[in-house]
Amino acid sequence: MKRPFIYHKTAQKQAMESPVKKVTLHEAAEKMKQMDRYYLVDVRDEMEYITGHARGSILFPVNTINAQTAAEILPDKEVPVFVYCRSGARSKRAALILAALKYRDVFDMGSLAGWTDMEY
């Protein structure tokens, strides 16, 4: 017999306290306009990056993110980090890893689809 899913206040509290903030492309672009410094990180693989990426983005494939590589590529943990990929799955994973590595402000932009059509 399947047990029914019960939404607990603990799960709600954890979701509210998540160090990763999910943002749309438009929200991310508006936030970046107001910031002096930020990292815009493409977490796809190199071949995907070569075929097209957001202007000013840093290539940092999700499968290479660890404490050592993050310290080299994103040295300042106080600078906001915006991550994106093709579909949103890798950006979510990368954002969680970076948050676990104590990056202060991590924004998951999800998919890059549509970015080139927006004027930012």
Image: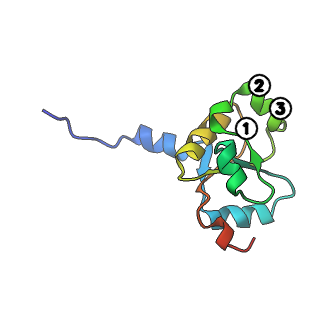
Query: Judging from the image, what secondary structure is the residue with disc 3 in?
Result: helix
Residue 51 horizontal/vertical position (percent): 68, 55
Q: Which dot, 1 or 2, sits closer to the camera?
A: 2
Q: Horizontally, is 58 left or right of 36 in the view?
A: left
- The residue under label 1 is 103
Q: Position of residue 9 (x, y in %)?
A: 40, 42
Disc 3 residue type (three-letter): Glu
Q: Residues within 10 Å of mark 3 (few under 14, many from 20)?
A: few
Residue located farthest toward the top when viewing the structure as drawn: 68
Give the amino acid type for the residue marked by disc 2 in the picture. Gln
- Left or right? Give the position of 16 relative to 66: left
> Residue 82's x, y, as percent?
70, 51
Which residue is at the front of the view, 101 or 10? 101
Q: Looking at the image, is 46 positioned above or below residue 119?
A: above
**Which of the pair 14/97 is nearer the observer?**
97
Give the residue displayed 77% in from the left and 47% down from the top. Answer: 58
- On the question of residue 7 being in view, the answer is yes
Badge number at residue 68: 2
Query: For numbered disc 1, what is the local secondary structure?
Result: loop
Disc 2 to disc 3: CB gap under 8 Å: yes
Real-space Cα distance between discs 3 and 1?
A: 13 Å
How many marks overall? 3
> What quarter of the picture does the C terminus occupy?
bottom right
Whether residues under marks 1 and 2 lie with C-beta atoms below 8 angstroms apart, the answer is no
Describe the element under mark 2 as helix, strand or loop. Answer: helix
Q: Which residue is mark 3?
A: 72
Which residue: 71% across, 33% down?
A: 102
